């Protein structure tokens, strides 16, 4: 196994499990740990390693920094205090919202339930009178967490790197071509403008100029038929 030290800009593939200190698993790439997280749900659990570019804000900052200088093939156990993980709890993020806001949206504010408020996740703490107490702190804020990490490999293949970025940014596997330092992605028409906003990210991570093309109509029809 290689003992090469990792550096900023390396693409790597890792397995990891994150859990609350002395508590439950909240994130993982491993099948057995994912099954623990979803044991109350009757659906198939899919697992695969996480591929990303070191030092480019694709992983938790403190873990990103920790992995620089570490070795391929090694396992690490990293304990993080709230400041290095999901932050301290902030009482300013606990808000009172009028009950009528929920009624207008046909929502039932039940204590313990988490709801999406214009892109922000808030947990209902209490309902009293015409007010609802909502906590917008991250669910893991204020908690010590532990990550068990294993660096599986350094990703050298350009196609694998491109697939990793597509998965990370878009959760999609687009058709692509690389020619003369230019990466061309073929995407559905409604996504073209949005994906063009990531040109700087692809340049920064891969050193490639990004061109976004609308996929041909025949390909789009085939994809719909196969779904």
Image: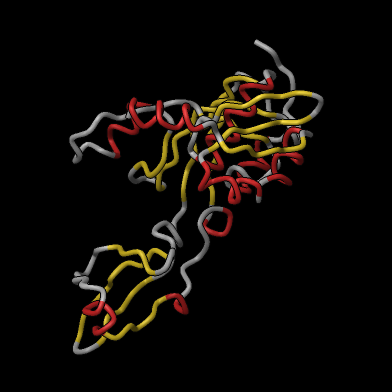
Residue situated furthest front in the rendering: 217
Q: Which residue is nearer to you in this view: 192 or 167?
A: 192
**Relative vertical location of residue 193 with respect to residue 124 in this rendering, above or below:** above
Q: Which quadrant would the C terminus be assigned to in this image?
A: top left
**Residue 65 image-quadrant placement:** top right
Q: Residue at x 64, y 21 (%)?
A: 159
Q: Residue at x 38, y 80 (%)?
A: 95
Q: Which residue is nearer to you in this view: 32 or 50?
A: 50
Q: Which residue is nearer to you in this view: 133 or 105?
A: 105
Residue situated furthest top in the rendering: 1
Q: Residue at x 70, y 39 (%)?
A: 202
Question: Residue 147 appears at what percent x and percent y?
Answer: 49, 39
Question: Residue 132 appears at what percent x and percent y?
Answer: 27, 80
**Relative vertical location of residue 209 with respect to residue 154 in this rendering, above or below:** below
Q: Which quadrant would the N terminus be assigned to in this image?
A: top right
Horizontal side of residue 213 vs 31, given as left or right = right
Question: Residue 5 appears at what percent x and percent y?
Answer: 74, 25
Question: Residue 166 appears at what percent x and percent y?
Answer: 57, 35
**Relative vertical location of residue 207 with respect to residue 115 in this rendering, above or below:** above
Residue situated furthest right in the rendering: 180
Q: Residue at x 65, y 47 (%)?
A: 196
**Relative vertical location of residue 209 with respect to residue 153 in this rendering, above or below:** below
**Residue 135 image-quadrant placement:** bottom left
Residue situated furthest bottom in the rendering: 129
């Amino acid at each position: 196994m290689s003992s090469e030290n990792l550096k900023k800009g390396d693409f790597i593939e890792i397995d990891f499990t994150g859990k609350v200190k002395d508590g439950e698993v909240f994130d993982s790439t491993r099948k057995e740990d994912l099954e623990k997280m979803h044991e109350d749900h009757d659906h198939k659990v899919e697992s695969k390693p996480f591929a990303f570019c070191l030092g480019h804000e694709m992983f938790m900052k403190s873990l990103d920094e920790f992995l620089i200088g570490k070795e391929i093939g090694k396992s690490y156990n990293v304990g993080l205090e709230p400041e290095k993980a999901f932050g301290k709890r902030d009482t300013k993020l606990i808000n009172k919202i009028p009950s009528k806001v929920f009624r207008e949206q046909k929502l039932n504010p039940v204590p313990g339930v988490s709801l999406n408020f214009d892109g922000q996740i808030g947990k209902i703490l209490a309902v009293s009178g015409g007010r609802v107490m909502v906590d917008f702190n991250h669910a893991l804020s204020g908690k010590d967490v532990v990550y068990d990490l294993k660096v599986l490999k350094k990703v050298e293949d350009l196609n694998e790197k491109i697939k990793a970025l597509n998965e990370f940014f878009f959760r999609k596997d687009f058709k692509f071509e690389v020619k003369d330092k230019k990466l061309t992605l073929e995407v559905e028409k409604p996504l073209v403008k949005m994906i063009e906003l990531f040109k700087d990210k692809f340049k920064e991570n891969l050193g490639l100029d990004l061109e976004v093309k609308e996929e041909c109509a025949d390909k789009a029809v085939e994809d719909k038929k196969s779904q």
